[in-house]
Image (cartoon, rainbow, N blue to C red):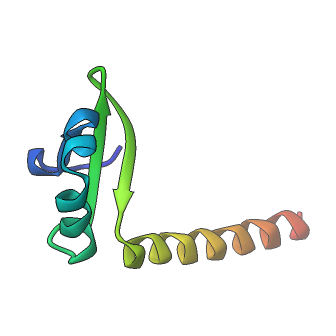
Amino acid sequence: MATFSSDEIYTATEVVRNFSSILKKVKTKEKKRIFIVKNNKFEAVLLNMDEYEKLNDAFEILQKLYKKTKETK
């Protein structure tokens, strides 16, 4: 489960109304991520590109490792 602080959580309405300023916070790395809540449920995460690329690279490495372990069995 992800850990986060309350200043990283925005409602969907807040995101719609303040998209430019929220995007700027993520883009300038003031915040690495923003959690978006709709109807009291976590629905999405907005990441800056650096964070996304790190996660994507890690995912690709894990996929390769998983594939290798499946091939050796």
Residue in view at x 26 percent, y 63 percent: 23
x, y percentage for residue 69? 79, 68
Instruction: Tell me the quarter of the picture where residue 15 sits.
Output: top left
x, y percentage for residue 18? 18, 49
x, y percentage for residue 10? 20, 42
60, 15: nearer the viewer: 15
6, 15: nearer the viewer: 15
From the viewer's perspective, is 30 left or right of 63?
Answer: left
Instruction: Tell me the quarter of the picture where residue 56 sits.
Output: bottom right
Q: Is residue 5 above or below residue 24?
A: above
Residue in view at x 59 percent, y 68 percent: 59
From the viewer's perspective, is 8 left or right of 12?
Answer: left
Quadrant where the N terminus is found in the figure = top left
From the viewer's perspective, is 37 left or right of 44?
Answer: left
Residue in view at x 27 percent, y 73 percent: 27
From the viewer's perspective, is 50 left or right of 67?
Answer: left
